[in-house]
Amino acid sequence: MRVAIVIVALVLGSVAFHLLSPWWQTPLASNWEAIDSALNITLLICAVAFIALNLFLALALIRFRHRPGHRARYDPENPSLEKNLTFWTALGIAGMLAPGLVAWGKYVDVPKDAAVVEAIGQQWQWTFRFPGPDRVLGTAGVEYMTPDNPFGVNPLDPFGRDDILVESNELHLPKGQPVKMILRSKDVLHDFYVPEFRAKMDLVPGIVTYFWMTPTQDGTYDILCAELCGTGHHQMRGSVVVEPREQFEGWLAGQMTFSDLLAGASPEAVTKLFAQANTCTRPATWGMR
Amino acid sequence: MATTIADDLTPMHHPRTWVGKYVWSQDHKVIAIQYSVTAIAIGLVALVLSVLMRLQLGFPGVFPWIQPENYLQYVSMHGMIMVVYLLTALLLGGFGNYMIPLMIGARDMVFPFVNMLSYWVYLLSVLVLVAGFFVPGGPTGAGWTLYPPQAISEGTPGSQWGIVTMLVSLAIFIVAFTMGGLNYVTTVLQARTRGMTLMRMPLTVWGIFIASIMGLLAFPALFVAAIMMLLDHVAGASFFMPSMMSMGQATDTLGGSPILFQHLFWFFGHPEVYIVALPAFGIVSDLISVHARKNIFGYRMMVWAIVIIGGLSFIVWAHHMYVSGMNPYFGFFFATSTLIIAIPTAIKVYNWLLTLWRGDIHLRVPMLFALAFLFTFIHGGLSGLFLGNVSVDVPLSDTFFVVGHFHMVMGVSPILVIFGAIYHWYPKIAGRMWNQALAQVHFWVTFLGVYAIYLPMHYLGVLGVPRRYYALGETSFIPESAHLANQAISIAAIVVFAAQFLFFYNMIWSLFRGPKAGPNPWGAASLEWQTPDTPPRHGNWGAKLPTVYRWAYDYSVPHAPRDFIPQDEPHPKDTAP
């Protein structure tokens, strides 16, 4: 009896906790309403199942608790009941899977007009790269990295010269512009995660990964690393500033290009950089354009 | 049938010395206890590590001796110990060993020597694992998933020596498991007594049987992954290591794939969830049936659900990798297969509930744990649907939602079953009964405590609090109240931790001082309660093996004199002249 009451109390308590808890999703700041609504549909179906199953459990415990003289019913199986339950469960599952897959269909389908922005992870900081006026990121790779070329941009690739390098953990993005985030890691796994954007994806050394989203709210948001990357994992922070296009353009214009970087480096360093690039016989690690 | 061989007592060499009986023992019951005690002992280490983690998360900065590298080491060792060295070893090596021969009416495992070897090799794997705490740099802090490159790169604790002891220990464990697993499968297939058809076996045996088959198929993937990573680390191979930088220096690795490791790991890792869950499913079915004095509802459906879950669990692994950078189109397939597996799982839940319906429910402590399992498993199973449903997983992955979910479904739930099972079978194994009051207190604190720990974690995860963070530090989106939640969780964790000592005290005290238990205190129908001796002796059945006439669930049969009929009791017509 006591356990039945506790189970009812836990169900009611869980519902109350859900309604009263101050901890829920951060306000959405991107286009991913589809993810939020898939989550809400999943939550609704699961909540109904949670409440119904546990109340049935409590009811069974109250009605069929042991009393002297009482005897259980011999009841091996009931195929039609089992078939019905299977059917309704499958329906519930389909009801949450469908919106989930629809949202995923959007997630993997990058719009043609998405602007390209590259986020680069390393233990334990973020840097960023924008393509210049040619709208193409130059090839890059670990093999091109020197202290003077921390981004590893291929100096032999003409597409890389106008690339804009943001050697800071602060990224700016224009509001309302779909963005394809190109992700690459110099060292270990990382994960680009902005809770308000909902979207996230791992950075994997050796390959290029991506996801896309459209920032929809002005503001400054935290960038977290969401894939364990060593002792400084919890300190691998950045921030993303979403702002109107004009302000964004102004910020971008103030950043350094790869050409600026080459012009500012000492002649010896540039020679070394090209010499190192000339020895590379295989395609750049991050050849994706 | 093996029964005629088994009936012949001459090949049974009863050990004569104390060492032969209790140390180098080939008796499945002694091996089961060796396995269980070792698993629980190393599990205690994991329990302490979890409290240390909670101290750091609840009270950051208060314990200056917990540094980021220590925290990550606690996380990693806690996870690996719990999943592999405690849960797998205890459910299969412990319960599998004890229950299979007794429940199917065999005298022992079919390969007793291999069985003994399995335990000693397991012990060796535990010792190598523990050695990781004492090597330079300490144990690995790469997370229990051991993802490369960080597992063997600078910047991760234990990336020199700790990872080696971990990988070697896993390889040894898998050797031990393979010896045990082959034994469990062969014994179930070959050593069932007369009349014990597969469809008369208790669900405990079904769960352990299918889990053992799964283990034999899944652990090799982990084995090769461990060997490949060892080669990467000590022999300069590049299976998982691309060309990359490490602490500002280019490595000489080239062309390896970190995601390949994740595929191998989760091809093992997801079935592993069910390797732990299926024995628990089986055991809890039997606990509910016995203490509700009612046959398990839909027995055949329950068996098929176990088999189908076992099969499907091999094609869902990449739901752990939706945001890993693998080809995103895989997401469609793995989300669908993952949510389909919820159907047989839901059927099991319905059948447990329908077993209680119209039962005669005795709320004894083993039953209370079984009911608590139902509650936590329903919760954990449902929260799994969020994570399986690919796009919903995107915001939640690598947050505390994941931590809350998997602890609820494969931490708390199986452990509640294990407690229930220990209380349930203790009188048979020890011959004595445990103390009621202590067991009740242990149950209530544990059940309510774990819910207080894990429910809020889901909400922190939805908020976006990332997992495996030594400290949350300054963030714009985490309110002050979330830190209070972390404190409350930590306090609940410490209370639950303390309550476990009531359990240990009760078990040890009762071993010597508990009142004598009868051979069948719960009135159970399955075969293990019908042994001629309690605790059962070497050989289990005395001179003659039992013959089975019915399934394990003849409870409250109409017109029967008692509310249960043991499996080895003939039908009236069978005894008629």
Image (cartoon, coloured by chain):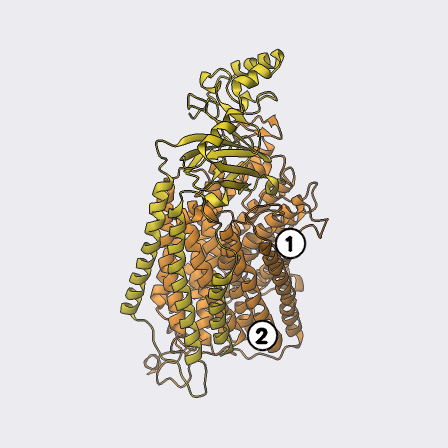
Q: How much space separates mark 1 and mark 2, taking CA atoms?
A: 26 Å
Whether residue A136 appears in this view of the structure is yes
Whether residue B545 appears in this view of the structure is no
Taking depth in this image into account, of B516 and B418 the one nearest to the observer is B418
In the rendering, which numbered label is found on residue B49?
1
What element does badge 1 sit on? Answer: helix
Q: Is residue B82 above or below residue B529?
A: above
Q: Is residue A64 above or below residue B490?
A: below
Image spot of residue B67 (x, y percent):
68, 46
Q: Residue A110: which quarter of the image?
A: top left
Q: Are marks 1 and 2 in contact (CB under 8 Å)?
A: no
Mark 1 Cα shell of 10 Å, populated few (<14), some (14-19), many (≥20): many
Sooner in the amino-acid sequence: mark 1 or mark 2? 1
Image spot of residue B136 (x, y percent):
70, 40
Q: Which residue is mark 2?
A: B440
Q: Which hue is chain A drawn in?
A: yellow
Q: Is residue B316 left or right of residue A140?
A: left
Q: Is residue A269 left or right of residue A79?
A: right
Q: Amino acid at mark 1?
A: Leu
Taking depth in this image into account, of A224 and B326 the one nearest to the observer is A224
Q: Is residue B109 above or below residue A178?
A: below
